[in-house]
Amino acid sequence: MIYPNDTRVRYSPELSVWVVDTQQAHAGGAQDLLAAMMAYATEAGQMPDGCTCAPESFSTAPLSFAVSPPRAHKVYVRGGLVIAGHGTVPFRGRAADVGNAYQCPLSDAAGEERAYELGKAGAWDALHALTAPFPGVAGTLQPADPGSEVPAVWEGHLHADTRADLARVAVLSDEVARLDREARRAQATATAGPEAARELAAEAAMTGKALEPGEVTRLLTQRQESAVAARAMADGTRDALEQVRRETVERITERRDEWLSYLHGQAAHGLARLDLVLTELESAVENLAEIDRVRQTVERPVPRGLFAAGSPIAGNAVEAARQARERAAGALAGLERHAARVGTEKASQRA
């Protein structure tokens, strides 16, 4: 898994190249790393304007992370440092290579040539100075600014219209379950039809009463027809349930931007509150630890080491809480990328 706060990829607008540093990589090679960061940049609206090099398909969800290769090419490689250019046209490629490659509008042969020369000369510091972190957006969720307005909370953080859709799904799910039970009972009755017919014939023989013509046939037919009708009703309702589920998914997709913006606001303010709690927790723990250190000397004072005893109270509770905070900020990083994309779009509209 490659995370959005990875700092090993940089981009130079001046040279139109990426620099990927995998010298101390712990996950994936240069191609995988560049593809992942392009995927995150695409989500955040942070790809270079006009660039078409992003992977054709990707999912950045933690449990289903997958990206296709980036549409970029290597300009220069030395050890774990890779310079990559826009499009898949090979560096200094021939005409035949160009015809069969994916071309990006931002491809810059002169910029690549300059980057190549810098890399070949080992002038990585000079190249680094021409680049900036890519993507240029915070890799984790950022806390809300102090004093900023807290958005109103949606019940269960669910959009009101989606709650109505989910209520329809719940009603239909219960109905499908009920009709399935009835269909199974009807099928069991139909399956037991021949046995019921034999019992009917035996009873008639014992009482000396003759069965009416076609009575057994009618019994079996009615049971089978009832089973078929019950199954058709259950299946029809199940089809209606699946349709409502599909419609619910479509409407969630339609509301995605509004919903993600709401979730970003809630998460950012939640993280800000957590930071305040952590500060208070740290102060409270330190105060209790100091009381404990003083207590130890007061109870058993000795000439040396006055008030110098350690306290087990400090422990690692605060550090564990801070690690939980960082995990939360990382898990919710997608909301920060969404907010950055929305901000970029609004800025371009104002321009």
Image (cartoon, rainbow, N blue to C red):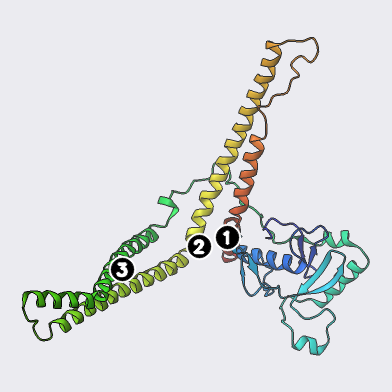
State the residue position of label 1.
338
Q: What residue type is labelled 2?
A: Asp
Instruction: Check whether the beta carbons of the residues at disc 2 and disc 1 lie within 8 A of each other.
Output: yes
Which quadrant holds residue 294? Answer: top right
Q: Residue 186 appears in which quarter of the rendering?
A: bottom left
Task: Please tell me whether mark 3 or mark 2 is closer to you in this view.
Answer: 3
Q: Is residue 199 above or below residue 350?
A: below
Mark 3 and mark 1: Cα distance apart in space: 43 Å
Specify the quadrant of the image occupied by residue 235.
bottom left
Image height of 89 relative to 127, above or below:
below
Q: Which amino acid does label 1 sit on?
A: His
Say which of 192 and 286 sits in front: 192
Q: Quadrant of the N terminus?
A: bottom right
Q: What element carries label 3?
A: helix
User: Secondary structure beneath disc 1?
Assistant: helix
**Residue beneath disc 3:** 180
Left or right: residue 7 versus residue 325 is: right
